[in-house]
Image (cartoon, rainbow, N blue to C red):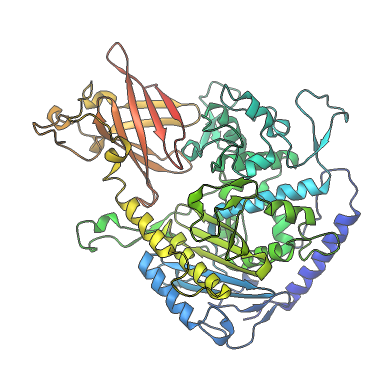
Amino acid sequence: MRLPPSYSIVLSLWVTILVLAQAQREGSGQKVVLSPPSSPSPSSSPADGHSLPLKGGKGEEGEGEGGRGGKGNGPLDAGFAAFAREKLDRWRVPGVAVAVVEGDDVWAEGYGIATFPSTPVTPSTLFYAGSTTKAFTAAVVSLLIASGNFSTSSSSSSSSSQGKTPLNWQTPLSHLLPSDFALQDGNGWAAAHLTLEDALSHRTGLARHDKALARRYPHHDDNGTETHPGTVRDVTRSLRHLPVATEPRVGWRYCNLMFMVVSHAVQTLTGGRWLGETMRELVWGPLGMGGTFLSVEDALEGGWEVARGYYWDYLGEVGKGGEGGKGFVPVPFSSLYLASGAGGVVTSVLDYAKWIQCLIRGDNANNDKNGCPVLPPEAHRELKAARMVLPPSSRRGYDAPLSYALGWNVGTYKGNRVFMHSGGMEAHGAEVYFFPELGFGVVVLANTAVTSNVVGWELAWKLINERIGVREGEGFDWAGLGKERVDAQLKLADTAIESLYPDRADPPLPRALPLERYVGVYSHPAYQNVTIELVDGDKEEETAQRPTDKGERVKEKGELKAIRDNMEWQMTFEFRHVSGEFWAVVIDMLNTPNMLSGQLARAEFVVGVGGTVEGLKMEFLEDGSEGVIVFERIA
């Protein structure tokens, strides 16, 4: 299989023109680069085969035979193909695509099923890439900074040129978004001083709060009765209602919302231009990444093959010896407009191979030599500079605990510097690694949640260890970590009460009111409405809520539920009574209900002096406590 030679020539000419244009550009205005040539159409993409050995920069096939396990497949040989299929079966993943970069060479292969019943994964199959998007957001910011065409002033400065400061990594978000960026009361210093660098390195102190992402938001200029589809501006304005977990810059707290804030800042700086267009003009176009999008709708409308997401019905197998479940269940394509620069990319391993080749070639770039001038030397340096140390648990098989740069984890493995990032969506997973000094990188994309990442670990680290010379059995046990996580998730609901409330009353205290009195609508300005209903819609007999003489629970499953289908991440909340007004909440994804992405939360109903439920307190616990969210009962 061969990429059209004309496309490689056009791309090379375009990169040359781009570099010259950037060098001659005047330091005024907000135009950053010229518009790139049209992206290659799906019909010219290498979608008609399963493997694609390439010689980088030449548009030519590698030596040897193509096809699955052919001699031209380099590290993706017949033995690796068998290993990949074994892992797909072991972890219940329909399909996976893999690309390996070695200097100028790229090998790519697809294994398994992209869409049932029979559409195979190919190197050009598109997948959701999740949080690996963050590196592109940081790269776009680096290009805006390097252009010298953007400046800011503090909210107290005049609008004249006096007091203007060139855009840089230390630019406060409040200077870029003075009307929109604010934090909860009591966090005034952080709101005034948090910077682009802080947001892009997860050191703002804000917890995840992913469950606060809504599909619709009230208009800013009315009483909240009218709504509109959510935007990154809405997300930014919602932060003022969310508790902050820690002081800024004292700990690493992963926060997708802050990347959405940066997305809003970029769009504001570029005159309201959609971030996806800016990414294409500044990065994807110059690199020839014609099959990469910030909108799955754009990919589908363009005729690209996007792998369908699936989940395996583990829960249907419970108590049936592994039999009786529904197997793979398809998941609807998710619109990721709101995910934006935090996790909205849809791409192929072929395109991502071009991206990591750029990052490898530009490493340690200086003004005399830059192997990938799409990013200037200072961008290559800044994007990879460590900003925050991760917890000790991040060490795993690395030489030391990892750090976080700007959209990348960074560490060393067997003395070799490595950059990596995972991505996880509702029914897709991504793993990306590159070793600059080795000129080596691996990309793995697959189509389930959680287990795709486990497959990615196993496949990527087999390739990495073989390249470095680590013998089998001497590396970290990624399969063991995967089994530990999957097993824990499948037991999460059963152990919810014990893990959340180990010091609960025994026997438990009865709740204050009949079950149906807790039914209602509870509202929070950021998390919006939680509508609580009876499980199965039936009233429950009083005896079902009382402990027996032996202190045993009559009923162990949830008694109340809430379906959060109005949020960006659609979830179900199942409330299980613990003692008094305290409840355990088991959270699962609405479209992938197998608990692999499940979470737990604590809840407490607030009963007023008049004997009615007036509110609900919830403590979500993704990556640690996210603070207490107080919902007011409104119906």
Quadrant assignment, res 271: top right
* Residue situated in front as seen by the camera: 564 or 158: 158
* Residue situated in front as seen by the camera: 267 or 496: 496
| Extreme residue in the bottom direction | 64
Is residue 402 visible to the viewer in this orientation of the structure?
yes
| Extreme residue in the top direction | 610
| Extreme residue in the left direction | 549
Quadrant assignment, res 269: top right
Q: Residue at x 85, y 59 (%)?
A: 367
Question: Residue 539: image x %, image y %?
Answer: 19, 30
Question: Residue 597: image x %, image y %?
Answer: 40, 50
In the rendered structure, the answer to whether residue 492 lies left or right of residue 40 reads left
Judge whether 319 appears above or below 224 on screen: below
Q: Residue at x 85, y 43 (%)?
A: 29
Quadrant assignment, res 10: bottom right
* Residue situated in front as seen by the camera: 527 or 256: 256
| Number of marks drawn | 0
Q: Residue at x 36, y 68 (%)?
A: 90
Quarter of the picture holding the N terminus: bottom right
Quarter of the picture holding the C terminus: top left
Judge whether 476 appears above or below 102 on screen: above
Is residue 278 visible to the viewer in this orientation of the structure?
no
In the rendered structure, the answer to whether residue 293 lies left or right of residue 451 reads right
Judge whether 37 appears above or below 278 on screen: below
Question: Residue 316: image x %, image y %?
Answer: 26, 56
In the rendered structure, the answer to whether residue 388 lies left or right of residue 323 reads right
* Residue situated in front as seen by the camera: 66 or 326: 66
Q: Residue at x 16, y 36 (%)?
A: 553
Question: Residue 313: image x %, image y %?
Answer: 31, 57
